[in-house]
Amino acid sequence: MRNLLQDVLTCLRTLSLVSSRIRLVIDVWPPGIFRIMAGSGGHGADEIRADGPVPIYQQIASILRRQIESGEMAADDRLPSESDLVGTYGVSRVTARRAVDLLRSEGLVYTVPQRGTFVT
């Protein structure tokens, strides 16, 4: 198991996905099934639970909302692109788009065509 963890961390470092702000969770149950989750922060608040009662797009929107409200993302900061959200959370583009649409409907972000989505 230790070799597996070292290999995973080496791969993630190579892909620049591990920094001091990344928390990695590897779930090995049932035996032979591995689920790897990476997220910022040191608590479970940024984990996406596909099997939970809250839709995934709402979970992603909640993570982004928390980052905006905490000041981690300031006014006029660009949100991660749909492609970035897809890669970070392992979701479909439609799910990523719905998360951003939810934040837009709440007035937390605005989109500039051909430029991206930014914090209000």
Image: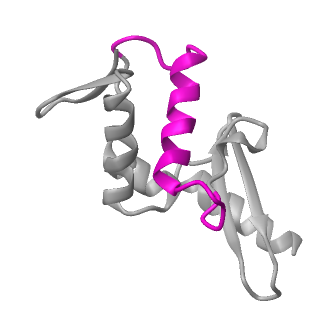
**Residue 35 in the image: x percent, y percent?**
68, 71
The residue depicted at 71 percent of the width and 35 percent of the height is 41
Q: Is residue 115 above or below residue 30?
A: above
Q: Is residue 50 above or below residue 16?
A: below
Q: Residue furthest left?
A: 113
**Residue 32 in the image: x percent, y percent?**
77, 88
Q: Quadrant of the C terminus?
A: top left
Would you say 95 lies left or right of 9 here? left
Would you say 54 lies left or right of 103 here? right
Would you say 6 lies left or right of 14 here? right
* Residue 21, magenta (yes or no): no
Q: Quadrant of residue 119?
A: top left
Q: Residue furthest right?
A: 2
Indicate the colouring scheme: one colour
Q: Quadrant of residue 53?
A: bottom right
In front of the other: 115 or 14: 115
Magenta-drawn segment: 49-76
**Residue 83 in the image: x percent, y percent?**
33, 51
